[in-house]
Amino acid sequence: MNPHTPVVVVTGAGSGIGAAAATELARRGLEVVVVGRSRTKLDRTVTAVAAASGREPASFTADYTRFADVRRLGAELRAAFPRIDVLANNAGAVAGRRKITVDGHELTMQVNHLAPYLLTHELLGSLRAAGRARVIGTASIAEVWGWPDPDDLDGARARFHSRWVAYGSAKKADILFGREASRRLQGTGVVATSFHPGVVRSGFGTRSLWFSLGRLFYASPESGADTLVHLATHDDGVEFPGGFFADRRLRWSTPAARDPQLASRLWDASAAAVGVSPDWLG
Ligand SMILES: NC(=O)c1ccc[n+]([C@@H]2O[C@H](COP(=O)([O-])OP(=O)(O)OC[C@H]3O[C@@H](n4cnc5c(N)ncnc54)[C@H](OP(=O)(O)O)[C@@H]3O)[C@@H](O)[C@H]2O)c1
């Protein structure tokens, strides 16, 4: 019998897929820790999780457009949870137009890829302490039209900017991160995967008329959370290092999203962008 209740950190838990996943994981008896940007939204999830589990979850806020916030979040989580079994890097968004953060990066790439990269780095000690830990990235099939360039992560040299191409690039970076993290962290017990949640009726893309048009036909947040919950609780979450999933199954991703050289170069570029050593185990 394992006397330890697995600790699951869910980011982007203030609404949509993250809120639904946190509630379901708590209902299943895991110790859920919720992270969001807006305190008001996060408090709604805290109430839902408490209702599902009879226990109020720990909650933390951070704005991913600021690396300083992500570092503070990492320090707070490390102090509160010396052992973390699952990190669900789920927070994400698509910026309406090209914006540069205070850290000097394109906002969509920072929020969807660089900030989770940094948070995972900051939590490595707690993840390793779990013995067998999972890092799950909420990616997207939008990766098909994205192309993260390790030499130009922020698309500064791109001839034109499209928010959906920027988003696709960030999501391809999430899949590549899962593959490369699993490779570089081999032997530590930490396994990373990523998944596509489906097209989901949530807070995502509400500022895009094009995306909002189909809302009525989109899946529920609970359905979007299903594969995340699966990867957090089923052996699939540790048996397929770097795997990209949808509907609880391993799925096809583009050749670029499986390219080991691109994955490695992107890792190094991401480390430089967030100011850490690419050798996480050094
Ligand atoms: N909906 C879809 O069809 C779809 C499809 C494929 C992938 N995804 C991915 O699924 C994940 C969850 O999205 P969702 O559909 O559940 O949408 P959502 O309801 O908008 O949830 C996104 C979450 O990310 C958080 N977030 C956004 N910007 C942030 C920032 N700067 N700093 C910190 N947190 C931030 C939001 O926090 P606040 O609420 O506090 O602002 C929110 O909790 C995202 O990674 C998204 O890219 C969604």
Image: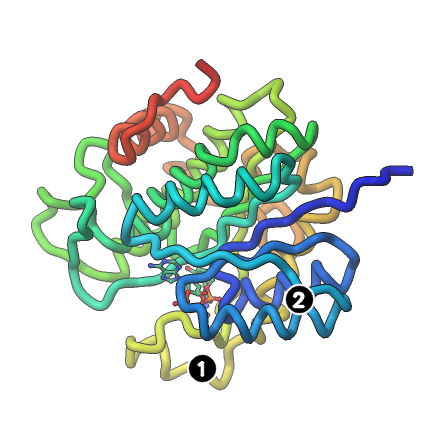
At horizontal 36% and vertical 22% (from top left) the residue drawn is 278
Name the quadrant of the C terminus.
top left
Q: What kind of residue is marked 1?
A: Arg
Helix or strand or loop: what does disc 1 sit on? Answer: helix
Q: Give left or right: position of 27 versus 168.
A: right
Which coloring applies here?
Answer: rainbow
- What number is the disc on residue 215? 1
Query: Residue 260 appears at what percent x and percent y?
Result: 41, 26
Marks 2 and 1, the one that precedes in the sequence: 2
| Disc 1 packing (10 Å; few <14; some 14–19; many ≥20) | some
Q: Is residue 94 left or right of residue 8?
A: left
| x then y, percent, for residue 238 | 68, 35
Ligand number 1: quarter of image: bottom left
Q: How many marks?
A: 2
| Disc marking residue 188 | none
Read off the residue under disc 2: 23
Q: CA distance from mark 2 to mark 1?
A: 23 Å
Q: How far across and down, in percent of the image, does residue 178 sit?
A: 49, 37
Any atom of ligand 1 within 8 Å of the CB at mark 1? no
Residue reaching furthest top? 282
54 and 220: which is toward the camera: 54
Most distant residue in the right direction: 1
Please name whichever residue, 142 or 136, is drawn nearer the observer in this view of the structure: 136
The x, y position of residue 241, in whole percent, is 60, 32
- Name the quadrant of the N terminus: top right
Position of 32 with respect to 193 (left or right) is: right
Q: Is mark 2 within 8 Å of ligand 1?
A: no
Mark 2 residue type: Thr
Query: Residue at the location (41% across, 37% down)?
Result: 255
Give the camera-side residue of 170 and 134. Answer: 134
Q: Residue at x 36, y 29 (%)?
A: 267
Quarter assignment of residue 280: top left
